[in-house]
Structures are given as C-alpha cells and as structure tokens.
Image (cartoon, rainbow, N blue to C red):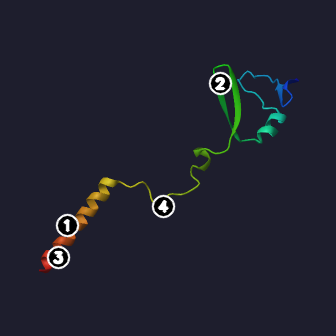
Amino acid sequence: MTDIIDIDINHCMKTITTTITQRGQVTIPSYVRKILQVSPRDKVSFLIEDNKSVRITPVRFDLEDVFGSVRPTKKPEDFKKLSRDVKEEHVNKIMQELRAQ
C-alpha cells in the first residue's frame, strides 16, 4: 500500500506500508532500496529520533567491512619481552667491549 502526502509545493513525502514477520523482520521495499542505493548484504542503520520516529540510512563504511583486509606485518609484539631482549643485547655488547680491552 502506498500513500502520497504533499506537505508543501517543494516537498513531497511518500509513505510505504510493509508487514513485520513473526521473527520481527521487514522487507525494505524496492522503491526504498533504490532511493537508499542499497543492495542485498549492504548495511543500514536506524536513527531513532526523540523515541517517536525512526530514520533508516545506508551505512557506507564501517570497521567490520575492512577487518582482515590488510594483513599485519607482524603478530602483536610482547613489549616487555622486546624491552628485555634489547637490554640483554646492550649488556652483551658492553661485555664484549670490556673483554676486548
């Protein structure tokens, strides 16, 4: 069911009614998907305004989309171990210099 309500000369609002399934899901009508430029598997967000209305907007980018797309050069470093190793290397270098004297 589609109702068109003219608010003023420069603005037109369209209401589209859909049904909520038993699992709490709704199908976004094709007209709305075209306006939002969304496709299957795209994400949308729901903005709740004053607990009175909800605005649906497309999500163009989020961290989940890029997670894993770049492989880290190294595994996360153990900085305590790294510090110990550097200190030990420094001590060994000094010991070698002292022995050489």
Q: What is the secondary structure assignment of the residue under circle 3?
A: helix
Badge 2 local density, few (<14 within 10 Å), some, or many (20+)?
Answer: few
Residue 21: quarter of image: top right
Q: Is 90 placed above or below 41 here?
A: below
Distance from disc 4 to disc 2, alpha carbons, whole Å, reads 43 Å
Which amino acid type is shown beneath numbered disc 4? Thr
The residue identified by callout 3 is 97
Judge depth for marks 3 and 2 and give the one in front: 2
Q: Which residue has dot 1 on it?
A: 91
* Quarter-of-image position of residue 23: top right
Does residue 50 lie above or below 11 as drawn?
above
Query: How far separated are the C-alphas under marks 4 and 1?
Result: 29 Å
Percent position (x, y) of residue 67? 57, 49
Residues at marks 4 and 3, CA–CA distance in whole angstroms: 34 Å
85 left or right, relative to 10: left
Q: Which residue does the numbered mark 2 point to in the structure image? A: 49
Amino acid type at circle 1 is: Val
Mark 4 or 2, nearer chain start? 2
Whole-percent x, y for residue 98 in the image: 13, 75
In front: 17, or 35? 35
Q: Residue at x 70, y 29 (%)?
A: 55
Q: Mark 4 points at which residue?
A: 73
Instruction: Classify mark 3: residues with Cα within 10 Å, few (<14), some (14-19) or many (20+).
Output: few
Graded by Cα atoms within 10 Å as few (under 14), some (14 to 19) or many (20 or more), the crowding at tag 1 reads few
